[in-house]
Amino acid sequence: ETGVTQTPRHLVMGMTNKKSLKCEQHLGHNAMYWYKQSAKKPLELMFVYNFKEQTENNSVPSRFSPECPNSSHLFLHLHTLQPEDSALYLCASTSVGLNEKLFFGSGTQLSVL
Amino acid sequence: DQQVKQNSPSLSVQEGRISILNCDYTNSMFDYFLWYKKYPAEGPTFLISISSIKDKNEDGRFTVFLNKSAKHLSLHIVPSQPGDSAVYFCAASEETGGFKTIFGAGTRLFVKA
């Protein structure tokens, strides 16, 4: 069983749809992240949750809405997305502390039509 | 403005030779640097890191060099193997900066047999 699991692996949605991405970590970590990877661009940090509290919102449009019900689960709710939102969405987790490396899930490849 | 830059989108190397991947950063507050490796359809995985108090860290075939005055780091892989073909992301963070890790755009390494 992988440490960080993301579902679904692939998602195609229309601009008027509402969908959710799910992330679950089995590593006992207490910080979880959403990153966006667009082609030929750096991984963009979207949201950070530390002990279920959102500590970072990197100027992300409100059509992306995160939810962290507990330290093991993280959701990204999507609504009225734009075609330019098509990207790979990566979830990651780590333990609070200094110099902690991130553990990533396999990502959700999102296509917005 | 990108704080972590990987100016080479791709690199091709012959098996057995050395691969050198480069990374530049602009934020002088960064004091911890990491390299992640990503295969297609998988999330990035941690490869090697270095703290700003060091200028070199070695782990098997992988060595990371840090030049703080030039704000430059590099990853050396020797000898390169076909299985090393992947996208390599440089990342940086601040020890006291909370939980933000900033990534570069990645360099795709091709190791030819």
Image: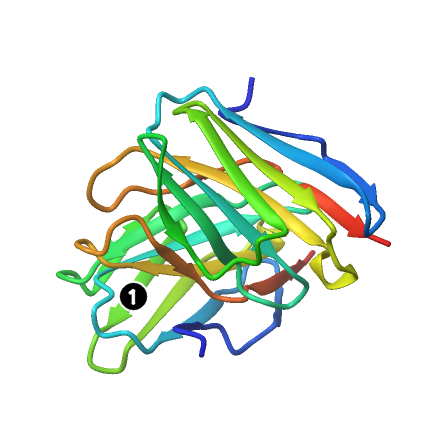
Question: Which residue is denoted by mark 1 in the rendering?
Answer: B65
State left or right for residue B20 relative to residue B99.
right
Chain letter of the residue beneath label 1 in the structure image:
B
Amino acid type, residue under disc 1 in the picture: Phe
Q: Quadrant of residue A93?
A: top left
Near-viewer residue (A98 or A11):
A11
Q: Residue A34: x, y in percent?
A: 51, 45
Residue visible at 60% across and 56% down? A37
- Which corner quadrant holds the C terminus of chain B? bottom right
Q: Quadrant of residue A96?
A: top left
Instruction: State whether residue B74 is above or below residue A47.
Output: below
Few, some or many C-alpha atoms within 10 Å of disc 1 (few <14, some 14-19, many ≥20)?
some
Near-viewer residue (A19 or A45):
A19
- Which corner quadrant holds the N terminus of chain B? bottom left
Near-viewer residue (B72 or B81):
B72
Q: Quadrant of residue B52?
A: bottom left
Residue visible at 61% across and 53% down? B86
Instruction: State whether residue A82 is above or below residue A79.
Output: below
Q: Residue A71: x, y in percent?
A: 39, 25
Residue visible at 46% across and 69% down? B20
Residue extending furthest toward the bottom: B70
Residue visible at 71% across and 31% down? A8
Question: Judging from the image, what secondary structure is the residue with disc 1 in?
Answer: strand
| Number of on-image labels | 1
Instruction: Evaluate whether residue A107 shows in this view.
Output: no
State left or right for residue A8 relative to residue B54.
right
The colour scheme of the drawn protein is: rainbow
Q: Residue A42: x, y in percent?
A: 53, 64
Q: Residue A88: x, y in percent?
A: 66, 50
Instruction: Evaluate whether residue B3 shows in this view.
Output: yes
